Image (tube, helix red, strand yellow):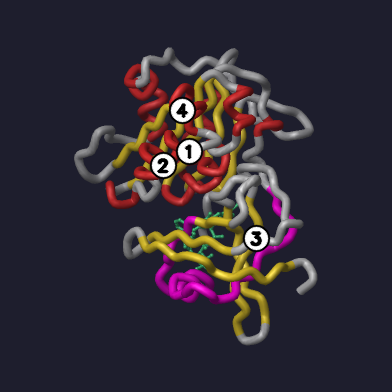
Amino acid sequence: MSNLNTERVLEVRHHTDRLFSFKTTRDPAFRFVNGQFTMIGLEVEGRPLLRAYSMVSSNYEDNLEFFSIKVANGPLTSRLQNIQVGDPILIGRKPVGTLVQDALLPGKVLYLCGTGTGLAPFLSVVKDPDVYDRFETIVLVHGTRFISEQAYDGFITDTLPNDELIGDLARAKLKHYPTVTREPFVHNGRITSLLDSGKLQADLGLGPLNRDTDRVMICGSPAFLKDMVEMLEGRGFEEGAISGPGHFVVEKAFVEK
Ligand code: FAD
């Protein structure tokens, strides 16, 4: 297991019967770029059972945090949802991922668009002081079916603006746009439709999507990614990578099996 660290669970928070978050200890040698993911899991019958997870914590924090689905009968999450403080967790030592700021061309407005647990990598990004240097405005968009699934709403609206390191920057530059599809809320509708129609931007006092100034990071279901990419490419946006920065970057929040 040389490619895995064994960390300990420090805290578990259950948001709903489908969502929970947990914090673990962090090996100081485990370095990552905000927005990346790594393989994490549990030892089951003497072997590691691992799945990809985005770090919610930022790379300067002492602990690691993850935001997780609970899949009924899911090999990992049917077990992981029962973890308790003090339990061991396996954390892969090689973080990777496409949702990194160096894969984007310079711009003015950065849209971070996540559905469900696809919010996770963007929580790491909005705690990163660098992102506030690079962009004039950061728009954090979280789409869920129900209000109860807006699991980090209180963190984004109350904790972050008062954070010692990031609070001033977040208050000046971060705009939060939570939207739900299945019950009335402050914002309703699918992220793709809200961006395509320009309603989301108008609600925030921003102009229509513009590839000269706007950059987009996307993380969600495969269907959401497909719709977003089609919409952005239709407007001339090109996908970026570290080897060739572009106007948007994409990562699946999970794989359909
Ligand atoms: P699996 O057998 O892995 O999944 C069973 C089915 O459950 C999938 O086919 C899919 O239909 C559904 N499913 C799985 N994960 C999700 C999800 N997150 N949201 C909605 N439906 C899902 N999961 C997280 O909870 N948090 C993360 O930060 C996260 N980051 C990921 C990053 C990447 C790059 C990828 C590819 C996946 C990520 N996942 C994340 C999904 C994760 O790897 C597992 O699929 C998930 O933990 C369920 O594991 P499982 O073994 O219980 O079920």
Amino acid type at circle 4 is Leu
Picture quadrant where residue 215 is located: top right
Which callout, 4 or 1, points to the residue nearer the camera?
1
Q: Is 90 colored magenta in this rendering?
A: yes
Residue behind mark 3: 26
Alpha carbon separation for disc pair 4 and 1: 13 Å
Rendered location of residue 13, percent (x, y): 40, 62
Q: Earlier in the sequence, mark 4 or mark 1?
A: 1
Q: Amino acid at mark 1?
A: Asp
Q: Would you say residue 176 sits in the magenta stretch?
A: no
* Chain part drawn in magenta: 67-96
- The residue tagged with tag 2: helix, strand or loop? helix
Q: Is residue 231 visible?
A: no
Distance of label 3 from label 1 (alpha carbons) = 21 Å
Instruction: Report x, y in % for residue 180.
Output: 30, 41
Question: Disc 4 versus disc 3: distance between alpha carbons?
Answer: 27 Å
Residue at (58% x, 52% y) in the render = 54
**Of circles 2 and 4, which is in front?**
2
Which residue is under mark 4? 174
Which residue corresponds to mark 1?
163
Which numbered circle lies on residue 159? 2
Indicate the quadrant where residue 39 lies: bottom right
Q: Amino acid at mark 2?
A: Thr
The relative height of residue 24 versus residue 56 in the rendered view (above or below) is below
